[in-house]
Amino acid sequence: MTWLLWRQHRIQLALAVAVIIAFAIPTWITGTHLSTALQDCQASSNCGGFDLLRHYGAIRVIVNLTMAVPLLIGVFWGATLFGRECDAGTATLVWTQSVTRRRWIASKVLTLFALSIACSATISGLVTWWSNTANATLESRFDGAQFDIQNIAPVGFAVFGAALGLAAGALWRRILPAMATTVGAFIGVRLLIELAIRPHYMSPITQTLAMGAAKQSLPSGSLEIGDDLVLHGHVLSGPVAVDASCGARALTRERMDACMSSVGYRIRHTYQPASRYWTFQWIEFGIFVGLAAILIAVAVLAVRRRDA
Amino acid sequence: MSAIVTEGLGKRYGGKWALRDCTFELPAGRVCGLVGANGAGKTTLLKLLTGLSRPTAGRAEVVGQAPADRVEFLSEIGYLAQDVPLYRRWSVEEHLQMGAHLNPRWDDAAGRERLRALRIPLEQKVGTLSGGQRAQVALALALAKRPRVLMLDEPVAALDPLARRGFLSTLAEAVADGDLTVILSSHLVADLERVCDHLVVLAESRTVLAAELEDVLASHRLLTGPRRDTTAIEREHTVLRSERTHRQVSLWVRLEGPLHDPNWQVEELNLEEIMLAYLGLGSSEPAEPVLSEVSA
């Protein structure tokens, strides 16, 4: 089996290694620069006006694009693993050699996940290390896009992507529909969880502030969920008719805020504090690995039980 | 010893039986032709015998084992699927290496020798070979596995007459060399006549005949005579097909014993005519179009 795995997947592996190296080199160079600069400014306790990142626009774009890695793993590794063999009919060739289908499935699936985890963990490790400067100065690692590409969440996504592709390939038995299903389902599930479910992994903390006590009074590094306008404890939605006393004359923003505060309006911030970052990473990772486990079971059963 | 035994073997896809009540026995060392119209269940039967699919009813045994996902079973069989699947971007050499890595009884020398004799370049990508060469590579792979039962699904259907002849002679040599049982589906009767000594005929998903080729030829006759009542003959023998004009009646008959009525004019039937009579069974359509390529 080892020979077969190597022969069949060596090109994919070589491509993955090439992509990782191509990504690692600029990331390493710019990351080293950034971390030296960060140490310098921290030594002089003068990171307030830290705008070094502004000169690293291109590499930041590339780093953010690593969000697509789990999807690519799903489409090009997951969906093709069973999909291609069934599509080309070679499944019947390999299943009538003196190797059981069970063993063939097990070796294929283990290889897929070992490589998916290795690749996504390497890229995520690089991204996390590179983002150290941004994390320290912008405190942004809990924000959607940054949360998705650092630490263990992206590894969970990669495992899920690979499992999704695997199941799509096993059920469709054709490559193109399997790839298309993988793309659609991956994006759908990721968006659903990120936008609708992630903010509620733990009950958020609310903080009610006077009007105009701007967002900077939110604890740094937190995941912001929303702002609501409240009046005497009731959340207001839709357009608000401000009292005549405030709205009568053209006002500056500050005077408007002060006036509304005096009438009783408050802003209520809802957020997840920075201290919950790792809990959220593990919950996100757990959810995607759990979904992956179900998909792997479906895929393996489909290939083992269904007739060739 | 029997190489293949089936008993009431059946396979249903959804509500439709692709194969049912399939019962036959194939002694070891035979070359068996599996004949039937398109959709008669030939591929289904072969997949059940290889263990690639599971029966809905009945049972099968191949060299004494139920087809299953086990090394002991898989190493006894060789299978060549209908579309001759190979890894198109691999060279012939790489296919041989795959065979060597995946099969404990692999006969590498014999596989290479066979391909060398056919002048098939081992370094060439399989996708660039001709259809006939690809079929030969696939056959060489299946044989190098040293199976006791080789199952071939329409291996020559897509080949030109010359490639077909080459393929069948490779097969015949392999059979002559050793203790190999072959079951080969085809609807090209002329080819079957050349290599087979046993026949299994499927019509409408059922086995309608399973016998030695010699016996098949000896027991089937065309009876013609003036028009009259045929119930007597239908009681004693099996009438496969009949044609009546207002003056004459023709019966394609499998004789189940001696023919007592001397009033019939008896003619021998060739294999093609016998097959046509069987393939017409159970369908009101004339059988001829199904076998139109027979004489090609």
Image (tube, coloured by chain):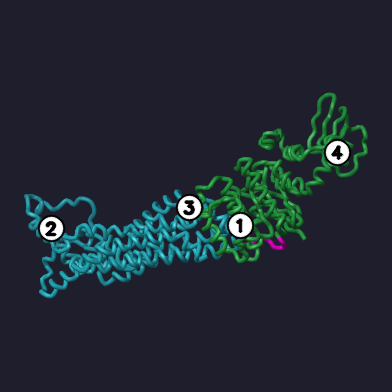
Chain colours: A cyan, B green
Residue identified by numbered label 3: B89
Q: How many circles with numbers are drawn on the protein?
A: 4
Amino acid type assigned to the residue bearing label 4 in the image: Glu
What separation in Å lies between label 3 and label 4 (alpha carbons)? 58 Å
> Magenta region's main secondary structure?
loop
Chain letter for mark 1: B
Residue identified by numbered label 1: B113
Amino acid type assigned to the residue bearing label 1 in the image: Glu
- Please identify, in this view, whether the residue under mark 4 or under mark 2 is nearer the observer: 4
What separation in Å lies between label 4 and label 2 (alpha carbons)? 106 Å
- Please identify, in this view, whether the residue under mark 1 or under mark 2 is nearer the observer: 1
Cβ atoms at labels 3 and 4 below 8 Å apart: no
> Does residue A219 show up?
no
Amino acid type assigned to the residue bearing label 2 in the image: Met
Dot 3: what SS? loop
- Please identify, in this view, whether the residue under mark 1 or under mark 3 is nearer the observer: 1
| Position above or below: A279 against B115 | below
Taking the spot 79% from the left edge, 49% from the top edge, the residue there is B212
Are discs 1 and 4 located on one and the same chain?
Answer: yes
Cβ atoms at labels 1 and 2 below 8 Å apart: no
Residue identified by numbered label 4: B234
Residue identified by numbered label 2: A260
Residue A15 included in the magenta stretch of the image: no
What separation in Å lies between label 2 and label 3 (alpha carbons)? 73 Å
First reached walking from the N terminus: tag 3 or tag 4? 3
Q: Is residue A140 left or right of residue B285?
A: left
- Please identify, in this view, whether the residue under mark 2 or under mark 3 is nearer the observer: 3
Q: Is residue A297 left or right of residue B37?
A: left
> Does residue B284 show up?
yes
Chain letter for mark 4: B
